[in-house]
Image (cartoon, rainbow, N blue to C red):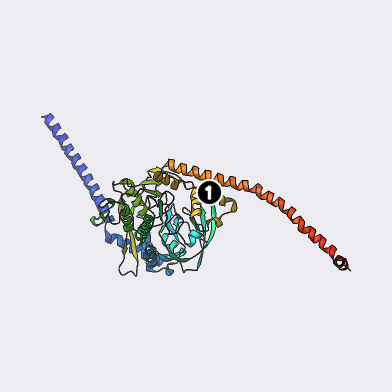
Amino acid sequence: MLQNQAAKKVFHWLVVVVLLGNLAYGAKVYSESDAVSQENDPHANLDLFINVLERIRRDYVDGSDLTYQDLVHGALEGMLSKLDPHSEFMPPVKYTHLKEDTEGNFGGVGVHINIQDGYLTVLAPMEDTPAYEAGVMSGDRFVKIEGENARNISMPEAMKKLRGKPGSKVEVTLFRPSTGKNIEVTLKRALIKVATVKDINNQRKFEVDENKIGYIRITQFGEETARDLEEALKKLELEEMKGLVLDLRHNPGGLLDQAVKVSEKFLAKGELIVTTEGRRKGENAQHKSSGRSARPELPLVVLVNGYSASASEIVAGCMKDLERAQIVGEKTFGKGSVQKILPLTGQEGAALRLTTAKYYTPSHEVIHGKGIEPSHKVSMSRRDEELLFLARTPGGLKMIDEDRREDVEGFEDPQLAKAMELLVGKKKLRAQAEKKKKEAEEKKKKSEEKKPEEKSEKEAKPEKKAEPKKESEEKPKADPESEKKPEEKPE
């Protein structure tokens, strides 16, 4: 009997403990769900936003100078910047600049910029622009723009300061990591017309070398890039091109459709180029080669470096995964996300640039944050990068002291050299180099052999001149009056 009563008590308290536990758990779940619902309640959070907006307008010391548009645009810029470095709110001026960029015709100094580690950093100077001709280089950081500190400057502010009426000037201070020094530069704004496809001499002639190897450099992916590339390839094919070096170094990217069209120039029909994947089904897409004007058998090497980004990485990643080309250089930047431009109706030309998907290579490797590893890693020092830049730049030799000009003229691009080795063969290149060296030595020897002959001729010349001299000495003797004239002049 006593045992039954004890068992009942134990069971009773066990039930109480379980009920209390359930109650506590239920309370916790309720409180968490309430907090979550409050976080996702648009009305409650909009009320908070409006309260803060009005408090700033009412109590901020300079609140009378602020408009609601100033505050709302500032809030939107902050909101988008919290997402990732590539999403942003674009007021009308910024959206106009973006459209001008992709059309390849605008007024400015000619630099692709991005925020890296809080610094406004040059991804790449655009070819044939004021910044390029002034010697601005990839990796340079803006310290000051028009005397104002550029640290932690936003992209819209930077664009506003750097762009302007063609012919006007902007003074900037740049920090160059390779030298550890600041550089003062005055840039004269110009109408920027971007030619995105160039040959090895920064022109559009496109000629093969002695081994029938062509070279094409794409500086960025604009609206006309694929068309210009096709023209360049046709010119090289007229010269019986046997292989191609496609240089994507310092290419910051551009339009997705142009990356696809460039890639399919070298692929058979139906081959996968890139996949985009996002939260919405509409963002998921596979881009395959159409096979139009394709050259799937052309030997190809692609050059990349740490400043090859976005569309450049799509091309390089595709060529590598499909084993269509050898990739030479250094790991790429790692910007593999899709930004959609979403115009905002009723906002006088404002828009959102919003990250909506990510790029994946044909083997479904993500590009974003990882980059593309080259098949053949060939590093270049900051000094090498600078010499390459100066060698490419029109008037580059004038930018440096005379004692350094020999370095630029004698610079051999190690990444391009590796590409040529892969396309031509090490033995053939070595034989050609030895032949050239031998020819140069023979030329030098012949020029040295000519020097003694020239000397002997010079030594013989005074003896021949001696005869006319005697005639000139004999002449005065025939005329006594002429002898007296020099004596009379001092009197």
Is residue 330 visible in this depiction of the protein? no
Residue for point 46% across, 42% down: 431
Residue 434: percent from left, percent from top: 50, 42
Drawn side of residue 257 relative to residue 200, left or right:
left
| Lateral position of residue 16 relative to residue 326, left or right | left
Q: Residues within 10 Å of mark 1 (few under 14, many from 20)?
A: few
Coordinates of residue 260 in the picture (x, y in percent) = 31, 55
Q: Residue furthest right?
A: 491
Pinpoint residue 171: horizontal percent, then vertical percent: 52, 62
Residue 471 visible in the snapshot = yes
Of all residues shown, which one is farthest toward the left? 1
The residue at the point 24 percent across, 55 percent down is 280
Res 228 → quadrant: bottom left
For the point 13% across and 29% down, the residue is: 3
Looking at the image, which is closer to me, 280 or 75?
Answer: 280
Q: Specify the farthest residue to the front.
A: 478
- Tell me residue 352's x, y (percent): 33, 62
Q: Nearer the viewer, residue 150 or 165?
A: 165
For the C terminus, the image quarter is bottom right
Question: Which amino acid type is marked by label 1?
Answer: Gly
Mark 1, residue position: 410
Who is closer to the viewer here, 22 or 382? 382
Q: Residue at x 59, y 45 (%)?
A: 445
Which image quadrant: the N terminus?
Answer: top left
**Circle 1: element type:** loop
